[in-house]
Image: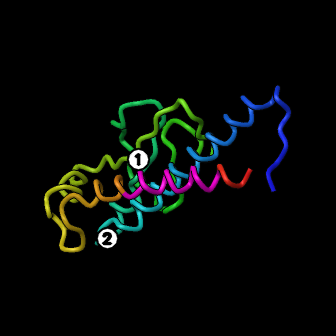
Amino acid sequence: MARRINIGQIGSFCEDQMDLLMRVVVLETDAEVKSQSPVDTGRFQTSWAIGENATGNYDAGTSGSLAPVGINYTPGTERVGNTYHVHNSLAYAERLAYQNWSKQASAGWVDIIARQMTNRTRQLADIIGRQN
């Protein structure tokens, strides 16, 4: 059943729904990149971090956790209008992502995830739109 919304609350309702979509997509993207990362010692996998409204050039180090790590924001506070980067600042990250440097992951696996998440975003937007 559709929820009734006061005409004066439509803007706020739509913004809340879009923020929810952004939150889910950012956190699912982070989880997907970590789960598909090649693992030797685990350092690469745990070095993924999310940045907000910046270039993605951070020295994240290793967190020792697979939980979302925010460099300049708090995970779970994503909002439409902001830009998010899921990135890995380790020196060998680009080689693992794009140059067949690992036997566990083919070159370009990060781009494949990006395309999958584009499709997932469309699916989630449809789900969120139908729930209300």
Badge count: 2
* Mark 1 or 2, closer to the camera: 1
In which quarter of the view is residue 9 placed? top right
Residue to which mark 2 is pinned: 39
Q: Residue at x 34, y 54 (%)?
A: 115
**Which residue occupies the foreground of this view, 2 or 65?**
2
- Amino acid carrying label 1: it is Val
Residue to which mark 1 is pinned: 86
**Which residue occupies the foreground of this view, 122 or 36?**
122
Residue 108 screen position, x and y as percent: 22, 58
Residue 121 screen position, x and y as percent: 49, 51
Secondary structure of the residue carrying numbered label 2: loop
Left or right, residue 40 beside residue 103: right
Mark before the other along the chain sequence, 1 or 2: 2
Q: Eyeballing the image, is 57 above or below 63?
A: above
Q: Which residues are magenta?
A: 116-128
Q: Residue at x 59, y 40 (%)?
A: 78
- Amino acid carrying label 2: it is Val
**Which residue occupies the foreground of this view, 86 or 49?**
86
Q: Quadrant of the N terminus?
A: bottom right
As drawn, the residue found furthest toward the top would be 8
